[in-house]
Image (tube, rainbow, N blue to C red):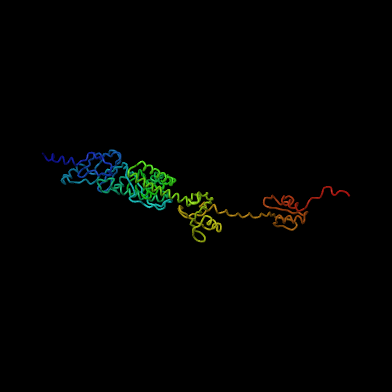
Amino acid sequence: MGFWDTLKPHAASQFLEVIEWLDDSNDTIVYRYPVFNQKITDNSKLVVREGQAAVFVSEGKLSDVFGPGTYTLDTRNTPILSFFQSIAYKLNYPYKGDIYYVNTKVFRENRWGTSKPFPLRDAEFGPIRVRAFGIYSYRITDPASFLRQVVGTDGLFTTDEINGQLKRKLVSALSSSIAKARIPILDLAASYMEMGDQLKTDMNPSFQEAYGISLTDFTIESISLPDEVEAALDTRSKMGVLGDLNAYTQLKAADAIQTAAANPGLAGAGMGMGVGIGMGNVMGGMMGQAMAQPGGFNPHQGMQGPPAPQPPPPPMEQRYHYNGPGGTGEFTASEIAQRVVAQRSANHQVWAAGFPGWKSWQEVAEIAGKVPPEPVAPPPVVSVSFHYAGPTGQGEKTLSEVVALVRAQPDANHQLWRAGFASWTLWRDVPEVASAVAALAGPPPMPGGPPPL
C-alpha cells in the first residue's frame, strides 16, 4: 500500500460534506456537532430542519445563527492549505470553532409543584397553608442568548439541566400572585386559567432576557389544602348534607338493630347487645329530657300541659373594633352611630372579622343606616331692596322702608331702581311696592256715598 493510499482515509475524515443533526430524543435542547480534527470545505452544506437553529462559534466567539433551511458554507482558509497544514502537524491540527444545534421546538408536559406548603391568609378560614401543582411548556426563542447565558461550553444540554431552575422561579412567582390576588380559597378553582395566563404574561419578559426562553403555556391543575383542613371541610360538608343529625343517628341505630336481628350467631348477638345498650342509653336520655322539661310526662304527676310560650332572646348586635375620637374600643353599631352624630367631622374608623382593613363608618351599611342625616339649615331671609330717589334724598331702601316713605308723602315723586329694571321707575309701576302700599291703605269708600236721611 502506497503513501497516498494510507493517507487517503485520514484525509477523507478531515472534510465535512454535509452538516446536519437528526434528534431522536425528547429532552435534548443543545447538541454540539463533532467537528474536532475536521474541516469545512467551500462546498459544505449546512442543513437546519424545522424546530432547529444552528449556532456557529468561531475561535471562542459566537459568529452566526442559522434558522431552518439549507446553506452553502465558506471557510476562512482554503481547504487545500488547511489540509497540508494538518499533514505538517501529523493530522492533529484542530478546527478552531464549534457548531451547536439548538432545539427550538416546544418542550411540553413539564411538571411543577410547591416543594412544601406556603402560608396564605384567607378571609373565611384565616391563616392557612396551601400547595399548588401543574404543568408548563416553553421553547427557545433566542438561541444565541440561551447559548451564552445558560449552556456555555456544554456539548449536550438537556431539559433536566434547566427545568429545575425554571420551576423554582415559576413557583415563587405563583405564590406571590396567589397571595396578592386575595381570592377566597374556595373560589380559587374558578380562577385557575386566568391566573395561569396572567403569570405567563408576567414571567415571559424576564425569561426572555435571562435565558432566551418563552413560556408557551402555564397551567394550574390544583391548589390543595393540608390534609387536616381538607378533613375538616369534608366533615363540614357532610354535616350540611345530613341536615338533622338526631334523625340520622336514630336511622342508623334502627338499621343496626335490623342487621343484628338477621344474624343469629355470636357476633350478631354481641352486636345486638351493644346496639341494645346504646339504644337504651339513647331512650333513657330522651325520657330524662322529657321528664325534666315542662309539658312532658311526669310519673308522679302525669302528663303536664304545654308550657306558656316564651319570647325568644333578643338578637345580639354585632360589635366592631372602633378607632376615633376618645380612643379605641369594641362597640355596637348603635354606639358607634352615636359617636358619629356627636362629632360628624371627625375620622371614625371601624374593623370586624372579614374586613381586609380599617374602614370609614360610611362604608359599613349597618352603621351608616343608624346615623340620621345631618340637619339642613333654613335658607337666609331674602330682603327685597331698591335704589331710591325721592323727597328725602337717595339711597338703598328695603321694601318696608319704601312703603313707609310713600305713605308719608303719597303724592311725591318716589323713583325706584334695581337690577333688571330698564330705568328708574315710579313706585306705582313696581307691583310689589304698589300692592304693599294698597294693603296698608284700608278698604276703599262705599260706592255712591251714604244714602240720604
Instruction: Name the residue furthest left.
Output: 1
Q: How far across and down, in percent of the image, does residue 304 sit?
A: 51, 50
Residue occupying image coordinates x 18% and y 41%: 13
Q: Nearer the viewer, residue 333 or 431?
A: 333
Tell me, yes or no, if residue 304 can be seen here. Answer: yes
Q: How far across and down, in percent of the image, does residue 60 sit?
A: 25, 48
Q: How many marks?
A: 0
Q: How far across and down, in percent of the image, does residue 56 sit?
A: 27, 44
Quadrant of the image occupied by residue 339: bottom right
Q: Is residue 106 above or below residue 434?
A: above
Which image quarter is the N terminus in?
Answer: top left
Instruction: Name the residue furthest bottom.
Output: 326
Q: Nearer the viewer, residue 127 or 197?
A: 127
- In the figure, is residue 335 to the left or right of 97? right
Quadrant of the image occupied by residue 216: top left
- In the figure, is residue 197 to the left or right of 401? left
Q: How far across and down, in percent of the image, does residue 366 sit?
A: 52, 52
- In the figure, is residue 219 to the left or right of 416? left
Instruction: Name the residue furthest front.
Output: 300
Q: Nearer the viewer, residue 39 or 310?
A: 310
Tell me, yes or no, if residue 426 can be seen here. Answer: no
Residue occupying image coordinates x 77% and y 54%: 410
